[in-house]
Each structure stands twice: as structure tokens, then as C-alpha cells.
Image (tube, helix red, strand yellow):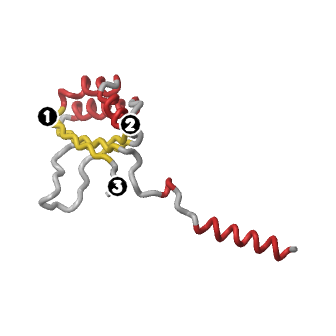
């Protein structure tokens, strides 16, 4: 009888270890729509402008109800190459589950407040939206 329990336990252990593909272990970015925004400030040397911009964008990140995952960063100090443009000052990435969520976000109060508080601080903004599609 002891052999049967050991055999069953060992079989279950082996079966469970073979199925270790967990969605949380995925390397894929969560979210169907990836919204990447690059900002060039008018005067990135002006500490007050930088502080105002950072406060406004962090408030947007905290208060947005439609963005799922988010990232705020500055250009990385990676190797300089012809294909790299690190002339921007900030990169904001939001993910959305649906086109509807991304569209509603455009008129979301947190987004509109951010634009009102920070638009005068940037000279250029570029946005790249991509959709997660099987390739």
C-alpha cells in the first residue's frame, strides 16, 4: 500500500512539473495596444520645468483608469548607432486592452489635465501605437 501512495505522489509531481508554463512567466508585454509616447522638452536644463513636467506625468500615471501597465523613462546610455534616436527627454509607455479603452483614455480627465499642465513644456511629442498581433 505504501508503494501505491509513493507511486501516485511521484506521478503527480512529475505531471505538475511538466506543465510549468504560467502566463505570469511570459516575456510578452501585457496589453493588446502599446501606446509609446516620446517627449522633447523646450528646456530640459530648466529644473523648474523638469519638475513641473515630472509631477504632471506622474500624476497622469497614478490617476489614469484605462492604462494597464506603464513605464516612464529617459534615454538609455546605450551604444551610439545610426539607428538610435535618443534625443528625446522622456518616454511614456501605456498598455491598453482594447481600442475602446485607448480611445476613452484620450478624453479621460487625468489625460486632459496632464496636457493642460504640461503642454507648454514640450516642443515635440511623437506617439507610436502598436497592436499585439500574431506574427
Circle 3 Cα neighbour tier, 10 Å, few/some/many (<14 / 14–19 / ≥20):
few
- Return the x and y of residue 36 as percentages of the image width and height: 27, 43
Which sits earlier in the primary sequence, circle 2 or circle 3?
2
Residue assigned mark 2 = 67
Residue assigned mark 3 = 134
Quarter of the image for residue 14 reads bottom right
At mark 3, the secondary structure is: loop
The mark closer to the camera, 2 or 3, is 3
Q: Which mark is residue 123?
A: 1
At mark 1, the secondary structure is: strand
Quarter of the image for residue 11 reads bottom right
Marks 3 and 1 sit apart, C-alpha to C-alpha, by 36 Å
Q: Quadrant of the C terminus?
A: bottom left
Q: Which mark is residue 84?
A: none
**Observer able to see residue 45:** no
- Return the x and y of residue 55 as percentages of the image width and height: 32, 31
Relative placement, left or right, of 12 versus 5 is left
- Residue in the picture at 76% in, 70% down: 8
Q: Quadrant of the N terminus?
A: bottom right
Circle 1 Cα neighbour tier, 10 Å, few/some/many (<14 / 14–19 / ≥20):
few
Marks 2 and 3 sit apart, C-alpha to C-alpha, by 22 Å
Q: Is residue 8 above or below residue 33?
A: below
- Residue in the picture at 81% in, 70% down: 5
- Return the x and y of residue 48 as percentages of the image width and height: 23, 31
Relative placement, left or right, of 12 versus 72 is right
The mark closer to the camera, 3 or 1, is 3
The mark closer to the camera, 2 or 1, is 2
Amino acid at each position: 500500500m505504501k508503494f501505491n501512495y509513493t507511486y501516485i505522489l511521484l506521478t503527480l509531481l512529475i505531471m505538475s512539473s511538466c506543465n510549468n508554463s504560467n502566463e505570469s512567466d511570459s516575456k510578452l508585454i501585457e496589453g493588446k495596444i502599446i501606446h509609446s509616447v516620446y517627449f522633447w522638452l523646450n528646456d530640459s536644463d530648466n529644473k523648474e520645468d523638469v519638475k513641473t513636467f515630472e509631477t504632471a506625468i506622474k500624476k497622469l500615471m497614478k490617476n489614469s483608469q484605462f492604462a494597464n501597465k506603464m513605464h516612464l523613462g529617459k534615454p538609455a546610455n546605450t551604444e551610439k548607432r545610426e539607428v538610435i534616436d535618443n534625443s528625446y527627454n522622456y518616454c511614456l509607455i501605456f498598455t491598453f486592452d482594447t481600442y475602446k479603452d485607448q480611445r476613452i483614455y484620450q478624453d479621460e480627465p487625468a489625460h486632459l489635465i496632464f496636457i493642460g499642465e504640461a503642454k507648454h513644456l514640450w516642443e515635440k511629442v511623437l506617439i507610436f501605437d502598436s497592436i499585439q498581433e500574431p506574427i
